[in-house]
Image: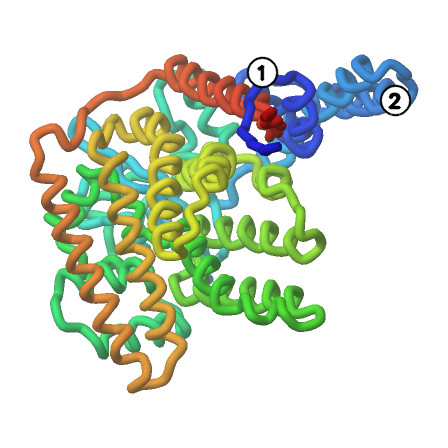
Amino acid sequence: MSVSDHWHSELSIDTLRHRLKAVPMLFVLIPFIAGILFAQSYVMPLWCAICGVLLALVGTILTLPKRVAYGFMTLTMILLGYMAVEAHHKPSIVPYGKVVEMRVDVVSPISEREGYSVAEGRVEAWLDRVWCDANQRVQLWLRTDTLNYGDRVHIVGSLKQRISKYEDYNDLMHRRGYVGGVSISESNILGIERDMVGGVRRYAIEKLDRYATDTASHSVVEAMVAGARHAVTSELRSAYSRTGLSHLMAVSGLHLGIVLLVINALLRPLSLIHRGHILSNILAIFVVWLFAVMSGTSPSVVRAAIMLSVLQLSNIFSPHYNSMNSLAFTVFAMLIYRSDYIFDISFQLSVLAVVGIVAWGVPIIRLINPRNTLVKSLITTLIIGVMATLWTLPVVSHTFGNIPIVGVVATPIALVFAYIIVAAGIFVLVLPHPLSLPFGYIAEWAASCQNSLVEWFASLPFASLEHTLSETTLSIYYAVFMVFTAFVWAINRKKELTLSYDIE
């Protein structure tokens, strides 16, 4: 008698239903987001929304059929999403039309228009005899080439309530959290702070400066490890932008994810002792937040740190936690705190990248699962890069009007060097001299290789394509992505054993 086995795959609605039950937060998050989007186009009295929530909750509790109860629950979440927008829709603290001194942060990449540029800004404070905190979101109209993403500019100007001449778009921008618009030109700038540096971050920059050997490579190391992009040349910025790799030089969830992977790998032996996994997860969260502080604690970094911390905490409470459910819970909590995050490009890209990795990347990695550790690490890096790029590419095209064609190929390769740069940078920051010396040289070598790779890809004639996806096309892309994800989740893989008897 001989035994043979093989895997058999089949589509099963029961399998899809079982996997969807493991992510209940999706059924909370999706209608909640729908409510936020509903609030951008329609206005109803707040008391009407509150009454609707109360009636829907009563219907959820009293209704016996599950499908009807789910319908009431969906309506409840839609109305709560609408109320979240209303709760954050507050009037401006800065007076409209009055010329005052303001400190304004440029908090998004700058986009070119005909004759001027635009960017998202945040009025950090304004002067009314004394400096008053504002922290209000504004549209910036820039008629100057001296500002970059991440700068803080001190100006004399006024806040205009009207953002657009089109009434519908003007209302939409206000409901997205913008209180108005601010014009900035050479004539009203009093001063510019490049890459605002705090105490811990200054220590990180000074520590990295000890190992500077090449200006171009060192500028990339500083940007990727300490979030200081002031030394990166315009030519290098252009090359990274053309290949779709600009996100590598802006500390984000990608960099914090690398930190988390490295720290988890180093702390893995702690899981061998009693309650060691709790200690290792707490230490990992601490290191993630330490890196976030050292890199400048920008809003996108803080959001990524919160997201990764929740995912790591889920690992403490259950070794079999569902990553997608934890991600959905984190996004839901952050949108409750600030509903206008949903329109923030860095938030969108961070969430979509993680969704792509969790929904498509992780299953593929598990399917391949090579035994060699080094090969597995390389394959994992490549798959993560491709999946993150695929899921963010439509939004990049819609927002920036550019499709980095080579990005799908260049991203996973560049990620190998990005892992080395960030991992070596961590050791440079935490180890005393001279133990940190070799890691400083390793980081600069990897940055030099990454720059050469990016410049070569950028030199290709087909590196990028200028094309802006419409909102309808964008929606179709992600609808197809979700349908494909549901299809994959419906696949049930079974191992079948075959017994054969040898008859003599």
Horizontally, residue 401 falls left or right of residue 69, namely left
Percent across and percent down for residue 419 are 33, 57
Q: Is residue 149 above or below residue 474?
A: below
Q: Is residue 448 above or below residue 75?
A: below
Name the residue beneath numbered marker 2.
58
Q: Residue at x 38, y 62 (%)?
A: 295
In front of the other: 470 or 161:
470
The image quarter in which residue 480 lies: top left
Horizontally, residue 459 falls left or right of residue 159, namely left
Percent across and percent down for residue 134 are 49, 50
In front of the other: 300 or 359:
359
Q: Is residue 437 above or below residue 110?
A: below
Name the residue beneath numbered marker 1.
42
Residue 371 visible? The answer is: yes
Q: Which quadrant, please, contains the N terminus?
A: top right
Q: Amino acid at mark 2?
A: Val
Instruction: Specify which label sits upstream in the sequence, 1 or 2.
Output: 1
The image quarter in which residue 206 lies: bottom left
Rate crowding at label 2 as few (under 14), some (14 to 19) or many (20 or more) other CA atoms within 10 Å.
some
Q: Residue at x 49, y 50 (%)?
A: 304
Q: Which quadrant, please, contains the C terminus?
A: top right
Residue pushed farthest front?
504
